[in-house]
Image: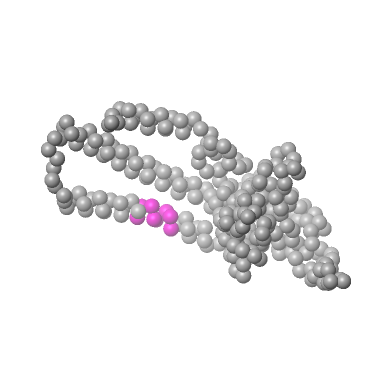
Amino acid sequence: MRLKAPALLAAVATLAATCLLLPTVSWATAVPWQIGQQAPATPIMERVHSFHDMLMWIISAIVIFVLALLLYACWRFAEDRNPVPSRRSHHPTLEVIWTVVPVLVLVIIAIPSFKLLYYVDVEPETELTIKATGHQWYWSYTYPDSGNFTFDANMIADSDLQDGQLRLLDTDNRVVVPVGTNVRIQTTADDVIHSWAVPQFGVKVDAVPGRLNQLWINVERPGVYYGQCSELCGINHGFMPITVEAKTREDFDAWVAEAKTKFARADEAPVKVAGVATVTPRPAQ
């Protein structure tokens, strides 16, 4: 059974129309049947979006061109139109073309790709450092530039979720950053390899035991952003989310002042009392 060209074109048109009717991006997090990436919240992700859109135009043109060639070949060389097939096996000019053109396409893609990699990798001058440590299975955060306090961020259980909180994405303590500020995120782990990733920031970096990796972000608008560990790290890998809340500078400073009294300092020396490890409290500075 041969598929007629009009029927194939109708199927492609139906698929395209269906895709256009599906939901596009969501601000806070992904939604069912979403097409496309989440809205960018950092300059890095804006450039990732731009690069993605450029690639979509290139690959769409390639797909349409190849589909046109395929349909033409199916029509032109059908048995009733070409009862005696050609025995030609080589065409030097055509072989050179289909080798050189893909190389040129790859060069066109490589130039903005290298520029994006350089932009992501070269860290600008930062005003705030946050250290994220992966554990099985939760994250802990330290603010060495803001009083050196530290806290754990555990996923909120289904039974404890409140209105507006997202299942598998919200944590009991959020990472708080000021908007419009270059923030350095340092990552490490104390057991296995984890990965700190937030899609709307366009960042993903491994947290490796014994090593210190880093990335940078600059969140452009207040809001709550969600991510998850993106490295298979054990049985509860899917249950150690990342919740980042971006605040204005004034609100961030107020949060820091409260956090200094709420959370312990990272440099508090543990002591043992009757064989039980405890922490000697120190006043926050």
Residue 24 percent across, percent down from the top left:
53, 36
Q: Quadrant of residue 57?
A: top left
Residue 157 higher or lower than 144, as above or below: above
Query: Where is residue 182 shown, x and y percent of the image?
Result: 61, 57
Give the percent coordinates (x, y) of residue 159: 75, 42
- Residue in front for this viewpoint, 23 or 15: 15
> Vertically, is 8 above or below 279?
above
What kind of secondary structure does the magenta stretch mostly adopt? helix
Image quarter (top left, top right, bottom left or bottom right) of the N terminus = top left
- From where the camera sits, is residue 285 visible? yes
Q: Which residue is found at the position 76% from the left and 56% from the top?
A: 256
> Where's the C terminus, which quadrant?
bottom right
Between 15 and 21, the one nearer to me in the picture: 15
Counting from the top left corner in percent of width and height, residue 234 is at 61, 57
Q: What stretch is highlighted in magenta?
A: 107-114
Q: Is residue 127 visible?
A: no
**In-image side of 188 versus 48 (left or right):** right
Magenta stretch: residue 248 in it?
no
